[in-house]
């Protein structure tokens, strides 16, 4: 291994950190850098709701990950562009970083449902520590909420708001769990299972308008429901963060396209975690995976393959998330026998 190898990882989440730790474990000498546009060290996104509710302190959000030794972590620095030919990353503050190999682990952010783009200014999206710092106090002070969507993060928020004795109306959209679509039966089962909460659940309806009036919001639906609320939160799935890869020559669709070894079409560049769209030989198509455990194992596999291994990404841990009694697959490469895996 030449002394001047520099492995760069875009993203400071579970995929990026586990990629970095694996690289360090296998290669004691290489220079390794993680770049993150958030001004916060590696943290547990799944605990953000406990943090907002005041159940845990900021220290308890942070991942105490000892395996990332001798790795430079550059926080608050956004990657704007990649030039694979010259092996350069361009940061927002104009700095260029040279890499010998690159792992893209840039995760995802809240997706705006196409039908809601006209109201996007009135919606609040909370999927990162940065978002939480922007809205935490507003959420704590507000009394009435309208949740539009209903993905996993949305349901965590719904339960958090319930535990904080807030008044919540939730409108569940079948496309909220994009790229999966909730069926009519699933929607009915979810709303039935939510009846135990003291809340109003709207299904099979659409938002007609959202207007801002004297600091609050008036939400009207097509079926004539009207609500005055302090905040409208939107949870409609996550969109891969890939803007910086556009025009670089790295193949993209809605995520970074990789083969089952997590390699992109460009030599020496890999992608993993929720930014990656992974090819599945069995279905001859690409799909994204969700969840923390998948991001961890994909980070490890991307790093091993970058170092010359040939590991095919495989299923890990929990294969389903329980969406209020409805099981949603977290994996993408096989049909799982529900009886065996439930
Ligand atoms: C509120 C919430 C609750 C959740 N609860 C659960 C749960 O209970 N169980 C579960 O399994 N999963 C849960 N998840 C999902 C889980 O957190 C994600 O699946 C996981 O974090 C994905 O990991 P990742 O490393 O791919 O991406 P991320 O964790 O999103 O990390 C991406 C990193 O890339 C950085 N980045 C992005 N763009 C750039 C750029 N241009 N330049 C530099 N850096 C960039 C980001 O700042 C971030 O550091 C939850 C998510 C949220 C938001």
Image (cartoon, grey):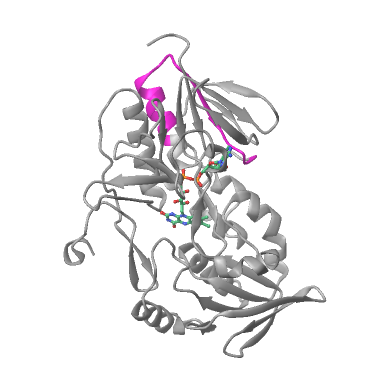
Residue at the image point whose x is 62% and y is 23% from the top: 96
In the picture as drawn, the residue positioned furthest to the top comes out as 3
Q: Give the range drawn in magenta.
A: 18-39
Residue at the image point whose x is 18% and y is 63% from the top: 337
Quick one: quadrant of the N terminus? Answer: top left
Q: In this view, does 208 lie to the left or right of 203?
A: right
Q: Is residue 133 left or right of residue 291?
A: right
Q: Where is residue 270 in the image (x, y as percent from the top left)?
A: 40, 33
Q: Of residues 305 and 31, which is closer to you in this image?
A: 305
Q: Position of residue 12 (x, y in %)?
A: 52, 38
Give the answer, above or below, for where 200 lies relative to 279: below
Q: Where is residue 57 in the image (x, y as percent from the top left)?
A: 60, 51
Whether residue 328 appears in this view of the structure is yes
Q: Is 101 part of what is drawn in magenta?
A: no
Residue at the image point whose x is 47% and y is 39% from the top: 105
In the picture as drawn, the residue positioned furthest to the right comes out as 214
Quick one: quadrant of the C terminus? Answer: bottom left
Q: Is residue 27 left or right of residue 75?
A: left
Residue 199 lies in what quarter of the image?
bottom right
Give the answer, above or below, for where 152 lies relative to 104: below
Q: Position of residue 121 (x, y in %)?
A: 70, 64
């Amino acid at each position: 291994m030449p002394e001047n190898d520099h492995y760069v990882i875009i993203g400071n989440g579970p995929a990026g950190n586990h990629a970095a730790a694996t690289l360090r474990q296998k290669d004691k000498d290489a220079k390794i850098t993680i770049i993150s546009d958030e001004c916060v060290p590696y943290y547990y996104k799944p605990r953000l709701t406990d943090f907002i509710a005041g159940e845990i302190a900021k220290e308890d959000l942070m991942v105490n990950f000892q395996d990332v030794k001798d790795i430079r972590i550059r926080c608050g620095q956004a990657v704007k562009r990649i030039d694979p030919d010259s092996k350069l990353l361009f940061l927002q503050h104009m700095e260029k970083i040279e890499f010998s190999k690159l792992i893209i682990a840039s995760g995802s952010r809240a997706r705006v449902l196409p039908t809601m783009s006209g109201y996007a200014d009135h919606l609040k999206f909370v999927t990162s520590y940065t978002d939480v710092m922007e809205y935490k106090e507003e959420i704590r002070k507000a009394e009435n909420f309208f949740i539009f969507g209903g993905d996993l993060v949305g349901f965590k928020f719904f339960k958090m708001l319930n535990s904080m004795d807030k008044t919540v109306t939730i409108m569940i959209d079948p496309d909220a769990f994009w790229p999966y679509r909730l069926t009519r039966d699933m929607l009915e089962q979810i709303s039935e299972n939510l009846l135990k909460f003291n809340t109003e659940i709207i299904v099979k309806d659409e938002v007609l308008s959202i207007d801002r009036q004297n600091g609050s919001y008036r939400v009207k639906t097509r079926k004539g429901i009207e609500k005055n609320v302090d905040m409208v939160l939107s949870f409609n799935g996550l969109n891969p963060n890939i803007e910086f890869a556009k025009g670089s020559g790295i193949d993209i669709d809605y995520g970074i396209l990789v083969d089952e070894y997590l390699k992109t079409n460009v030599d020496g560049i890999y992608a993993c975690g929720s930014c990656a769209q992974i090819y599945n030989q069995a279905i001859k198509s690409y799909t994204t995976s969700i969840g923390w455990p998948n991001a961890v194992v994909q980070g490890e596999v991307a790093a091993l393959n970058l170092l010359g291994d040939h590991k095919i990404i495989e299923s890990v841990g929990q294969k389903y998330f329980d969406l209020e009694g409805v099981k949603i697959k977290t994996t993408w490469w096989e049909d799982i026998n529900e009886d065996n895996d439930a």
